[in-house]
Amino acid sequence: MDQITHLINGRAAASTSGRTSPVYNPATGAQSAEVGLADTAEVAAAVQAAADAAEGWRATSLAQRTKLMYKFRNLVDAHIDDIAAKVTAEHGKVLSDAAGEVARGLENIEFACGIAESLKGSYSESASTGVDVHTVRQPLGVVAGITPFNFPVMVPLWTIPNAIACGNTYVLKPSERDPSAPMFLAELFHEAGFPDGVLNVVNGDKVAVDGLLEHPEVKAVSFVGSTPIARYIYETGTARGKRIQALGGAKNHMIVLPDADIDLAADAAVSAAYGSAGERCMAISVVVTIGDVADPLIDAIQTRTKALTIGDGTDPSSEMGPLVTREHRDRVAGYIDAGAQAGAKIVIDGREQEFDNDGFFLGASLIDEVTTDMSVYQDEIFGPVLTVVRTDTYEEAVALIANCPWGNGAAIFTRDGGAARQFQADADAGMVGINVPIPVPVGYHSFGGWGESLFGDTTMYGPEGVRFFTRPKVLTTRWPDPSTSTVDLGFPKNE
């Protein structure tokens, strides 16, 4: 049985807590490894390593930071297949999804490679007579990231490159469900030549989370996960004076107008709902049909859903893999029955699909005639379940998004430029797609939703990431009249 350790001050560190957690291969249901769960002392050791490295790393030139970040970028790029294989082995998503996750993470490393431009300050000469004012952005010190199981590579790369390029040192607490890929990232990071202690990894559960939130040396915490935990992270961390950015759950709507391209919309709905087995905070959960587009669209989605190949993520023919754990699979399956009991129409029941092993598989489900009082609409299911809500008007459809407590992503499918432009203004969400089902921003913009999808006022990565991991300092300077200087500058001396 593989034993997954921490990485503290550049070295592997076996857990001394005596607590462990199993790591499974979701495609087979077999345990593949065991990960040690950190106690408070182990978290403190990682934070101390980061604190010890902080002064030296902050003093490292932008040129050297950039040079090392480029090396890290090239190592990740060279190992895409290796990283993707580790993701698939412990998360279950198909290899193409896993490789795509790494590629999106690379965008964030590449943005951080331009940190010299991002950290440029501002300067005002002669704001008053003989007075100059300028603003600089300085690192916070030790920062931490608490990242989810569904993107064990991409989400750590949302924050690690920016935070470290800005001059901070970092402690990562990845999900204990699939820790091997983020640990491999950390190994590549050190192979790139970053000093010991700049990036540390502690595996763990709530004990480790609380250890980071309570440690006085940790100045900021970045989190991605469910809304209840995001709220807890935000309230606990801010109560201790820390900067917190906490991204929570989602219930993303995709509105389809009567003039939409049916094939385009159906393809988008299927890929956005069932990709990565629906375990994505940007997955389309609800298709909102307007008028008579409902029946032809549902027929098209049904045809495509039935044709999906579901299997082991390492099989090149697989288009969807298993869910991450047996318990999560069973929880998701429970929503299908709840929808039926509430009066929804089960067009495709994923529970009926049979698989020939003990993996955590569940077929893709399509549920029509859903209403807003049903649990399949109200809850974040986080699995391969796509619901359909029928409306008569654009106004009704937009109101659904506005009344949803989450505001992560929203999309509209239409050929009408006027309707699309209006939706850009009306959609009550932080990320909006026009004929794009999953509008995740590129690495040089920033990621974050509204409402209960985001706690804090700073979104992830890109320019907002730089702002989160630095604080501004304004310097006001006055110099004596050069004519009074004791150094001969060629000015006439005052008599």
Image (cartoon, helix red, strand yellow):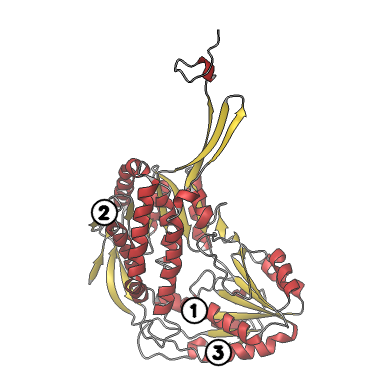
Q: Is residue 288 above or below residue 152?
A: below
Count of residue discs:
3
The kind of secondary structure element at disc 2 is: loop
Q: Is residue 422 left or right of residue 143?
A: right
What amino acid is found at the position of numbered circle 2 in the picture? Gly
Please state, as top left, top right, bottom left or bottom right, where the C terminus lies in the image.
top right
Q: Is residue 466 above or below residue 271?
A: above
Q: Name the residue tied to disc 2.
A: 10
Residue 66 locus on image (x, y percent): 38, 52
**Residue 227 appears left or right of 183:** right
Residue at position x 58%, y 61% in the image? 449
Q: Position of residue 305 (x, y in %)?
A: 54, 88
Q: Earlier in the sequence, mark 1 or mark 3?
A: 1
Q: CA distance from mark 1 to mark 3?
A: 13 Å
Q: Residues within 10 Å of mark 1 (few under 14, many from 20)?
A: many
- Where does label 1 land, which residue? 275
Q: Is residue 310 above or below residue 31?
A: below
The mark that comes first in sequence, 2 or 3, is 2
Residue 169 visible here = no
In the rendered image, which quarter is residue 251 located in?
A: bottom right
Out of 263 and 62, give the one closest to the viewer. 62
- Is residue 256 visible in the rendered image? The answer is yes
Residue of label 3: 304
Along the viewing direction, whichever of 211 and 130 lies nearer the viewer: 130
- Is residue 188 rendered to the left or right of residue 465? left
